[in-house]
Image (tube, rainbow, N blue to C red):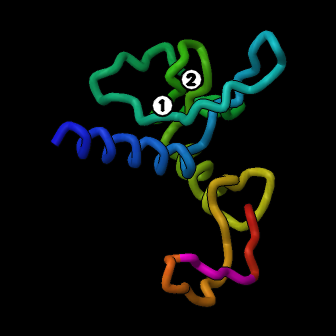
Amino acid sequence: DTVVRLWIGMTFYAGFSSLAPTCGKKGHSGASCQNPLWPISETANTSKLRCRTRGCEGIPSLSCSQVHHDVLCTGCATTAFRNCRGPPSSAASTHLYDGCVDGTDIDGVVYISDFVCR
């Protein structure tokens, strides 16, 4: 029972992370944080949080798990999610693939044509 719950949690985390916008805050090494932005609890104090989109005053709805990192409001988060799922581009998730399943064999091997990583 515990293993199944852990498996479900890990699957949800990986699935959400692959489609969620990521934190772009740069660290001391110059690399971006890249943590997924997670929904903010309704009971959280968001008075000091500001959307990362310049000039946006929307109510924060997604935040990086690291303090003082990126935050997105609902409108900007919706746009970011749409970009992650959109056609191949620099904003698209690299965990999504396009292709056509041509068939499978008896060993469970899946044959795919026109395969493209976003």
Which kind of residue does numbered mark 1 sit on?
Answer: Pro
Q: Quadrant of residue 27?
A: top right
Q: Which residue is mark 1?
A: 60
Residue 110 lies in the magenta-colored region: yes
Residue range in magenta is 109-113
Q: Residue at x 73, y 51 (%)?
A: 91
**Mark number, residue 116:** none
- What residue is shown at x 76% (from left), y 64% (from top)? 88
Residue that badge 2 annotates: 50
- Residue occupying image coordinates x 53% and y 51%: 78
Asked whether the beta carbons under mark 2 and mark 1 sit within 8 Å of each other, the answer is yes
Place of residue 49 in the rendered image (x, y in percent of width and height, measured from the top left)? 51, 19
- Does residue 96 appear left or right of residue 107 in this picture? right
Most extreme residue toward the left is 1
Q: Residue furthest right?
A: 30
Give the residue at x 36% y 16%: 45
User: Measured from the top left, where is residue 60 in percent x and y?
Assistant: 48, 31
